[in-house]
Image (cartoon, grey):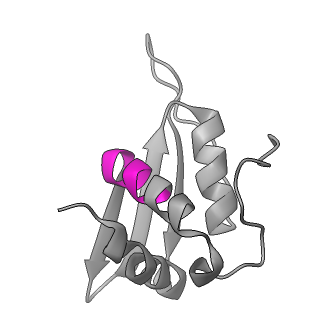
């Protein structure tokens, strides 16, 4: 995994511990490349995918999760993705919401 020394968070921190500037960065990335889902029957989830592995690894590091195997696409770059669900996703949604630019 890459050196994430430019980010001021570490595994084990709660979302509330992450500095504001990193939350703005995360919100911007998720707004462009992610999907927030909430439904009564299936719960909450955040899905994020893109072709830039280094960026998705940073998001996975923040979420304390792993990047899934890439989706191979003919004539295009591989699509890397991750997903968090349940209470973990709901907590991140609450933390990120104030940073959404209207």
For the N terminus, the quadrant is top right
**Count of number-bearing discs:** 0
Q: In this orientation, does residue 68 appear?
A: no
Residue 12: where, in percent of width, then height? 77, 78
Instruction: Tell which residue pokes out farthest to the top in this image.
Output: 75
Vertically, is 31 above or below 96?
above
Q: Quadrant of residue 14?
A: bottom right
Height in image: 29 above or below 83? above
Res. 8 image quadrant: bottom right
Q: Residue at x 76, y 48 (%)?
A: 4
38 and 6: which is toward the camera: 6
- The magenta stretch is 26-33
Q: Nearer the viewer, residue 76 or 98?
A: 98
x 28%, y 87%: residue = 41
The answer to which of 32 and 16 lies nearer the viewer is 16
Question: From this viewpoint, is residue 10 visible?
Answer: yes
Expressed as whole percent of the image width and height from the top left, the position of residue 36 reads 33, 66
Task: Check if residue 57 falls in the magenta segment.
Answer: no
Q: Residue 33's spot in the image, x, y percent?
A: 37, 45
Q: Write down the quadrant of residue 65 in the picture.
A: bottom right
Asked whether 31 falls inside the magenta stretch, the response is: yes
Q: Left or right of 6: which side holds 83?
A: left
For image coordinates 62% across by 67% down, the residue present is 63
Main SS class of the magenta portion in the image: helix
Q: Position of residue 74 (x, y in %)?
A: 45, 15
- Asked whether, in this view, residue 68 is left or right of residue 21, the answer is right
- Which quadrant is home to the C terminus? bottom left
Residue at x-position 70% and y-position 54%: 7
The extreme left residue here reads 102
């Amino acid at each position: 995994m890459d050196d994430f020394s430019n980010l001021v968070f570490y595994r084990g921190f709660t979302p509330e511990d992450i500095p504001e500037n990193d939350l703005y960065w995360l919100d911007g990335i998720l707004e462009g490349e992610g999907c927030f889902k909430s439904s009564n029957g299936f719960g909450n989830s955040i899905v994020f995918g893109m072709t830039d592995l280094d960026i998705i690894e940073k998001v996975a590091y923040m979420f304390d999760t792993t990047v899934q195997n890439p989706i191979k696409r003919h004539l295009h770059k591989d699509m890397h993705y991750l997903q968090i669900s349940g209470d973990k996703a709901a907590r991140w949604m609450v933390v990120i919401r104030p940073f959404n630019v209207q």
